[in-house]
Image (tube, grey):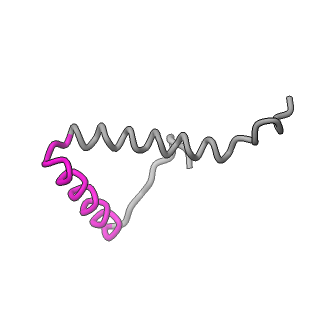
Amino acid sequence: MTMDQIVSLDSRQEAALQAVADKFVALHKGNVMKALKEMMVLNGRLQDQLDALKAPPLGKRYG
């Protein structure tokens, strides 16, 4: 999935997502901005890991 795709959730999925979001914000003592910033950092790290898995191993690159 790319960043430009829109995800549609049914009501059960939306409720589950809301519960997880509420817990994540609670971990940050209700500071939504701090929680958002940490989520952005975590997503960046995960994206870096995914990109590394997709890259050909060093020494095996052709071009």
In the displayed structure, 6 sits above or below 19; it is: above
Q: At 54% from the left edge and 40% from the top edge, which residue is drawn?
A: 48
Residue 35, located in which quarter of the rendered image?
Answer: top left
Residue 59 covered by magenta stretch: no
Q: Judge from the rendering whether residue 58 lies leftward or rightward of residue 2; answer left or right.
A: right
In the displayed structure, 10 sits above or below 48; it is: below
Q: Judge from the rendering whether residue 22 lies leftward or rightward of residue 57; answer left or right.
A: left
Residue 8 x %, y %: 42, 57
Furthest-right residue in this view: 62
Q: At 75% from the left edge and 41% from the top edge, which residue is drawn?
A: 56
Magenta span: helix, strand or loop, mainly? helix
Residue 9 x %, y %: 38, 61
Name the residue nearer the viewer: 62 or 58. Answer: 58
In the displayed structure, 1 sits above or below 56; it is: below
Q: At 44% from the left edge and 54% from the top edge, which residue is drawn?
A: 7
Magenta segment boundaries in residue numbering? 11-32
Residue 28 x %, y %: 19, 47
